[in-house]
């Protein structure tokens, strides 16, 4: 009974794919890191300023600074603090300053968003390539599983025939 079944005839579980899979994952992670470093290295003075201003403008201290600015400016210019108003109601100077700030901030935010969109496009391309590679690997594993299943059925048939011969 055991003479019909040799360990060398059994299909081996393929463990040699695991290091390859880890290597591909490591390459993809390095590609993402290299992409980020490349975009940071390629940015010009305006783009670096846009990124810095975008980080600043989206921070809580920036919001609190503006809140404090308005809390001081408006009562001062309404005469509530006892100081001479320099920008009487309807606060034309404040309106102009805030409008100019909004114009420049919106430009810098758009520049920063365009840079981020470009990074996202390249990252999506890399992820697409990784997903295609994973899909090919899954197809390869399906083929391997089907082959192992067929080999196991052949082994079972041989075992059944061997058992039938011994009984009969």
Image (cartoon, helix red, strand yellow):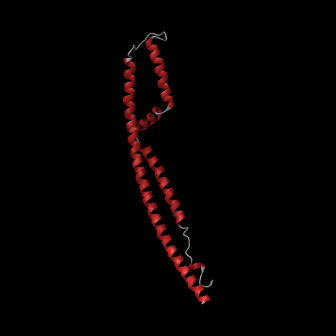
* Residue lying at 37% horizontally and 26% vertically, measured from the top left: 100
Determine whether 53 is above or below 152 in the image: above
Question: Which quadrant does the N terminus fall into?
Answer: bottom right
* Quarter of the image where one finds residue 117: top left
Closer to the camera, 127 or 49?
127
Count up the numbered dots: 0
* Residue lying at 48% horizontally and 11% vertically, measured from the top left: 80
Residue furthest toward the front? Answer: 168
Is residue 44 visible in the rendered image? The answer is no
Residue 108: image location, x then y, percent: 39, 35
Residue 158: image location, x then y, percent: 55, 83
**For this view, does 54 lie left or right of residue 3?**
left
**For this view, does 96 lie left or right of residue 15?**
left
Question: Which quadrant does the C terminus fall into?
Answer: bottom right
Residue 163: image location, x then y, percent: 60, 85
Determine whether 51 is above or below 70 in the image: below
Determine whether 14 is above or below 119 in the image: below
* Quarter of the image where one finds residue 109: top left
Residue furthest toward the right? Answer: 2
* Residue lying at 43% horizontally and 13% vertically, measured from the top left: 77
Closer to the camera, 9 or 112?
9
**For this view, does 156 lie left or right of residue 107?**
right
Is residue 49 visible in the rendered image? The answer is yes
């Amino acid at each position: 009974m055991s003479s019909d079944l040799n360990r060398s005839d059994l299909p081996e579980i393929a463990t040699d794919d695991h290091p390859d899979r880890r290597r591909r994952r490591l390459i993809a992670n390095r590609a993402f890191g290299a992409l980020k470093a490349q975009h940071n290295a390629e940015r010009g003075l305006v783009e670096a300023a846009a990124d810095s201003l975008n980080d600043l403008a989206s921070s809580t201290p920036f919001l609190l600074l503006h809140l404090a600015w308005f809390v001081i400016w408006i009562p001062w210019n309404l005469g509530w603090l006892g100081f001479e108003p320099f920008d009487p109601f309807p606060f034309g100077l404040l309106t102009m300053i805030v409008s100019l700030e909004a114009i420049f901030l919106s430009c810098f935010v758009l520049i920063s968003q365009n840079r981020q969109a470009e990074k996202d496009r390249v990252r999506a391309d890399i992820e697409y390539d990784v997903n295609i590679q994973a899909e090919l690997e899954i197809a390869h594993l399906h083929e391997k599983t089907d082959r192992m299943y067929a080999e196991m059925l052949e082994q079972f048939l041989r075992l059944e025939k061997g058992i039938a011969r011994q009984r009969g």
